[in-house]
Image (tube, helix red, strand yellow):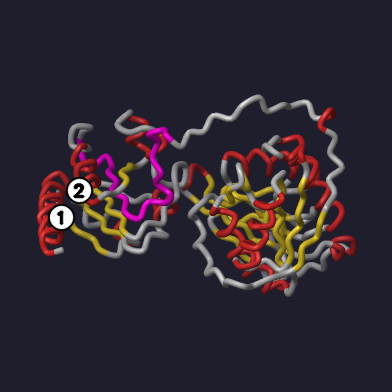
Amino acid sequence: MAEEKKPAPAAGGRANTKKELPEHFKAYKHVWVAVEIEHGQVHTVSYELLGEGRKLADKRGVELAAVVMGNDRASLEEAAVACFEYGADCVYLVCDPALAHYRNETATKVLTDLVNTYQPEILLLGATNLGRDLAGSVATTLLTGLTADCTELEIDDEGSLAATRPTFGGSLLCTIFTLNFRPQMATVRPRVLAMPERVPGRTGRIVEFDPKLVEDDVVTKVLDFIADRDSDKANLPYADVVVAGGLGLGSVENFQLVKELAEVLGAEYGGSRPLVQKGWITSDRQIGQTGKTIRPKLYIAAGISGAIQHRVGVEGADLIVAINTDPNAPIFEFAHLGIVADAVTLLPALTEAFAKRLRINRLAS
């Protein structure tokens, strides 16, 4: 139900987008972030959303609230303290035995009941596996609009949420408005937004909410939980240094040069979407709009052209170093340092130079 705003032509041929909000919309106030907590741990995307939500709330002149739900009161209260320190004015705390594990049925009921009771105008969730599952069912239950995988959130001149996301396979950026429904909902992937500064000691008010859940009425049961912390999957979104390769490397054998440089630097490695399609790398190492969004201190891109799909996933990096034989490659438009060279030749030289420098540093220490 999310709609793209198209201004209607006004007299004299000028577009006039000024529109008075429906009277019943005025009951909806404040910006909410649904905090993702799993096994007592708050997902960092929730703090990133609180930082962005703070900006939106300030522009609207309203409160920023966080919703924390679970079964362990101590961990919930600890999460509430963190939410205040990351910008929240209010925390809706929901503690119930039926919320010991995430289940779509219970989480959807709690969040929709909260929304119907307190009526926020904006509701934000992380575009994680859990967040995507919850956001879709909540939006459907509330009969409102949802803009998924946003790269930017803003408040327009009329006070509406302008949610920007890639579309048409990432070739275009489209700004979506939910004009006729409330709350306005959006999800944002981890690492798309910057982590806000934490303010120790900042406090707010806590609102306890009784979800009135009855375990016997819940169809889904959690029988066991198997952690994947020991898996060998990549952790690209949270790496400080990332080295990636593209089709410019020429062959899967040459991609080994990316891995070797990453190993010397103690970095994660990844690649562009075509490499996944060719089977050179697994999907968990894909970087870009349809893969992982990263915000490392250093990102080295070798043989990657830098189409908009890739740019969306990496432009938050502190330093982007691009290596490409084509001086007109799009990646040079947003890279901080561009090197026009054959990556197959340059990567081994970089690996050797970094290895030598690291050996010198170790000896000096």
Question: Within the magenta stretch, is there residue 219?
Answer: no
Identify the residue shown where x is 35% and y is 62%. 334
In x, y percent, where is residue 267? 29, 49
In x, y percent, where is residue 332? 29, 59
Q: How crowded is the residue under tag 1: few (<14 C-alpha within 10 Å), some, or many (20+)?
A: some
Side of 204 where 171 appears, left or right? left
Cα–Cα span, label 2 and label 1: 7 Å
Q: Are marks 2 and 1 in contact (CB under 8 Å)?
A: yes
In-front residue for pair 289/190: 190
In-front residue for pair 259/88: 88
In x, y percent, where is residue 217? 84, 29
In x, y percent, where is residue 290? 47, 42
In-front residue for pair 70/67: 70
Name the quadrant containing residue 251.
top left
Q: Secondary structure at mark 1?
A: helix
According to the picture, the residue beneath numbered tag 2 turns out to be 264
Q: Which residues are magenta?
A: 230-250
Can residue 75 be spotted in the picture?
yes
Question: In the displayed image of the protein, which residue is found farthest to the right?
Answer: 23
Question: Within the magenta stretch, is there residue 232?
Answer: yes
Give residue 354's mark.
Answer: 1
